[in-house]
Image: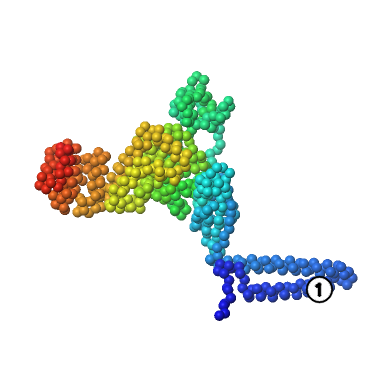
Amino acid sequence: MPTSPAGPKAGSPSQPTAAPAAGRRQRGAQEIVAAVAVAVAGFLAPSSESGYFFRTASAMLALAALFALSVALELYQEAQAKQAMRAKNKFEIVTTRVELPASLPGGVFGAARSMSELLNGFRVTTSTEMKVIELGFQLTSETDAGTRRLRARILSGDAVGWEQGGVAWEAQRELWMEAVHAAPRVAEVGSIGWKGIPSLPPDPPAPDAQTAAGCAEGSLEIGSVIRIDGVVSKPELNSKYATVVKAANEAGRYGVRLEGTKEAISMHARNLVPLPALDTLGVSVAALRSFRAAHGHLSSGLTVGQARHALLAPLTASSRLSLARALHRLGASDEAGRPLAAPATVMLVVADGEALDDALMAAEKHAASREAPGQEYVWLAALSVNAHAPPLEDLPLAWWVGPFRRAVQGIGQAAVLFQPWEAPRALAYGWCVWQLHTVLAANVPLAVLNSDAEAKRLQDALLTRMDDVVTAWDRKADGGWRKAEAGCTAADLKNKIHKGIDAEEGGAAEFAARLITGIHRWLLGEARVALDKIPTAERSTSRLLDHVASLLQEHGDLSAAEPLLREQCEGRAAKLGPRHTDTLEAVNNLALLLHQLRKLDEAEPFSKQVRAAAMGEGAVSRLMGRVEAGV
């Protein structure tokens, strides 16, 4: 049986067809004839007086010129044919490769600004797909000429752990991918020019007396955190952090304790550089709304961490300030004349992994719940901390315990974005854990926030399985955060956080107890909202009512629990009958509560009801013992 000849393979657009090949052969024969004719003409063209050698040279030169033009024409035609083929074949995937250094040149923001050059001209857009591959990452972009793919291989570093596949190498790969994600947004942020911040120049250089010559004598208080600088006799002390533990003597020397040591050493004031306090400028709701309106098409889908490099760093690249500080320096205000940046009234604790839109909406939501929303100013690390300065995480633990805590106390309020309810991201990031610890240790009121979508999920969970919600969060708060943060927090930062928490009075146990108490109080509010949604006929027999009453009693709010337990008794008696086990359990719970409230006369009828049921049927003898113990 005859077989048909094999056709060209799919995806091989470069394979020629028979007709073009014949055409090229025909053109080749014509070119040979033309070349011979030109050569003859070149040979005969010179005058008869010219010698044979001269005429031969003329013919060769003419032939060479024709050959060069023929080759150039052929190359041009092939390039045009390939371009036409790519335009026709939208399914062709062109793959290129590039090698990148392990360490990002200029950090995430610096690499994002020069990404086109680093990727050899590969165009990255907001729709470019990115995925991890074994030795780096892969980018895929759809263009008018077809699909373009780039495979980036990240080279090994020389340091331990920086070899391909090592822990540090993988961390650098994540940063490279973050820079790629930021790249298409960096240029556009500048073109938007929000509030004139991109063109705001940096502060003019001014002599820093403290940096140049230490601090003024007598200006440091005990507990101040400083950096040692300018020591000639012991240069190994320079750049180390210490805490002032003894006031200056007549010679201007302070007693300071180096981080990680117990003994104090004497240092002159000129060698002590105080660490700056936390910048507590916040931004208004109007600033948040304006920022979202201007950058919404760029911020959609970004996490807080990604937005720091993709939006906030390029926005403030010229001024090298935080967003809040840049607005303050510009004197920006809203339509009502209120400043867009002012001292913060609330600290918002948000994990870098949260969606930026969720964080900004949560800030607006919290401000709207206050008496004067227009006068609320939100401190959010991404907006209030300078992205161009060394990270706060690099500062010593003494700074976190001292100046940072005093700044939190000065703000006076805090809120945390707690989602998803099964595993809140705020407990998975070490920086957020420390902020929560500081807020609770400083007795600053803490509110819990979530997005509208997450609030609905939580409400549904409370209505059907409140036990699971309470258990999940209690586990996270009671030590579970130590495991949760392992995947999102560098080992050195995690150790610093644990050391700081354990060093506090009560340690991790006290932190967990405070956190659980705060969560339970918030859960009570959410549960009562969910309870109000249950039809009246079903409330008394719902497990949610039982949980709400129990939580109220657990936190000592007995008066608030009483009407709920009365409602439960009346509802169960009407629906299940007065002698039903569930009804008697509710009656017993109410009797015990009334005894705790010292309402003995009101408790007696309910106690008798339980006794009577126990004597008549013997089915609730266990409950009887609990009532007798209460009496």
Q: Position of residue 171 (x, y in %)?
A: 50, 46
Residue at point 58% right, 58% down? Answer: 96
Number of numbered discs: 1
In the image, taking residue 466 as reference, residue 382 lies left or right, namely right
Q: Is residue 366 visible?
A: no
In terms of depth relative to the viewer, which is nearer, 495 or 623?
Answer: 623
In terms of depth relative to the viewer, which is nearer, 28 or 502?
Answer: 502
| Residue reaching furthest to the top | 250
Q: Amino acid at mark 1?
A: Val
| Residue reaching furthest to the bottom | 1
Residue at point 65% right, 73% down? Answer: 21
| Residue reaching furthest to the right | 49
Q: Quadrant of residue 58?
A: bottom right
Q: Position of residue 82 (x, y in %)?
A: 61, 67
Q: Position of residue 368 (x, y in %)?
A: 34, 46
Which residue is labeled 1 in the image? Answer: 40
In the image, taking residue 310 as reference, residue 502 lies left or right, namely left
Quarter of the image that includes the C terminus: top left
Q: Is residue 473 visible?
A: yes
Report helix, strand or loop for mark 1. Answer: helix
Coloring applied to the structure: rainbow
Quarter of the image that includes the N terminus: bottom right
In terms of depth relative to the viewer, which is nearer, 478 or 6?
Answer: 6
Residue at point 38% right, 47% down? Answer: 424
Give the class, few, some or many, for how many residues have Cα within 10 Å of label 1's Cα (few <14, many ≥20). Answer: some
Residue at point 42% right, 44% down? Answer: 485
Q: Position of residue 489 (x, y in %)?
A: 45, 43
Residue 62 drawn above or below residue 97? below
Residue 90 drawn above or below residue 181? below
